[in-house]
Image: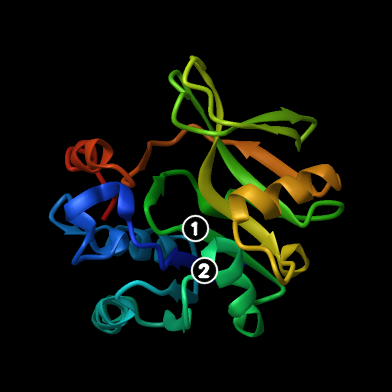
Amino acid sequence: MKQCVILAGGRGTRLGALGENLPKPLQPVAERPFLAHLFAKAARSGISEILLLAGFKAQMIAAFAEDEVRRYPGVKVSLSIEPEPLGTAGALAHASSKLDERFLLVNGDTWFDFDWRALSVGEPAFAAVALRHVEIADRYETAQLHGGMITALEPRDPQRAEGLINGGVYAMDRRAILAGEVSLEQETLPRLCREGRLAGARFDGAFIDIGVPESLAAAQDMTFSS
């Protein structure tokens, strides 16, 4: 896959005051905007096109992208800007005319450090999720994986001690997208799971999402490959 699509449109409400004036993907992490680490990872993974799905303060995302892409000759960056908040699945549907037949999809607030080129999608699946085992899974939906296919997606459970969680990196076939869906996590992935079209693969690289102040603070001490 040569195209990486990054979900960068959310408001970051869980970050409280930190997210009021700066989009989540641009929050400073290890002395750089978080999105800069994703750009570098994409470039190292052989990506030649980055498509940013922007919404909240899209002009700031656009300005960052215009400057950052100069670091990566041969990588093209484009934007799809939501006319109103559309949700993760809605943003994908809105950008459908710009999507390759198959593409990599990455959450703009998640770092999952494995070889992105190792994740692929093929029949019967329309999407493949990169899964990460964690010892404390109380904040996350978890997945049941059998024979390379995700057979169940289970809701968050404050009592859950461990499990396989969605690592925020996906290999996607354009056929996975259905107009009218709003949430990738709550609508698209469960539908694909029910249809037997949701694959999964476990990886063990460093993982963090910066969606809450505590994890954003913890991310400051991580090492990001240059």
Q: Mark 2 or mark 1, which has the lower sequence index?
A: 2
Type of amino acid at the residue the image marks with label 2: Val
- Please say if 161 is above or below 77: above
The numbered mark at residue 106 is 1
Q: Name the amino acid type tagged 1.
A: Val
Residue 52 position, x and y percent, is 44, 74
Residue at position x 32%, y 53% from top? 13
Q: Is residue 142 visible?
A: yes
Give the labeled residue for mark 2: 5
Up-down: is 194 above or below 19? Answer: above
Q: Nearer the viewer, residue 55 or 100?
A: 55
Determine contact: label 2, label 1, CB under 8 Å: yes
Residue situated in front as seen by the camera: 81 or 62: 81
- The answer to which image quadrant residue 94 occupies is bottom right
- For the question of whether residue 28 can be seen, the reply is no
The location of residue 2, given as percent across then percent down, is 57, 71
Where is residue 102? Give x, y as percent: 69, 68
Badge 1 element: strand
| Quadrant housing the N terminus | bottom right
Q: Residues within 10 Å of mark 2 (few under 14, many from 20)?
A: many
Give left or right: position of 23 versus 92.
left
Side of 193 relative to 170 (left or right): right
User: Which x, y percent locates residue 9?
Assistant: 41, 68
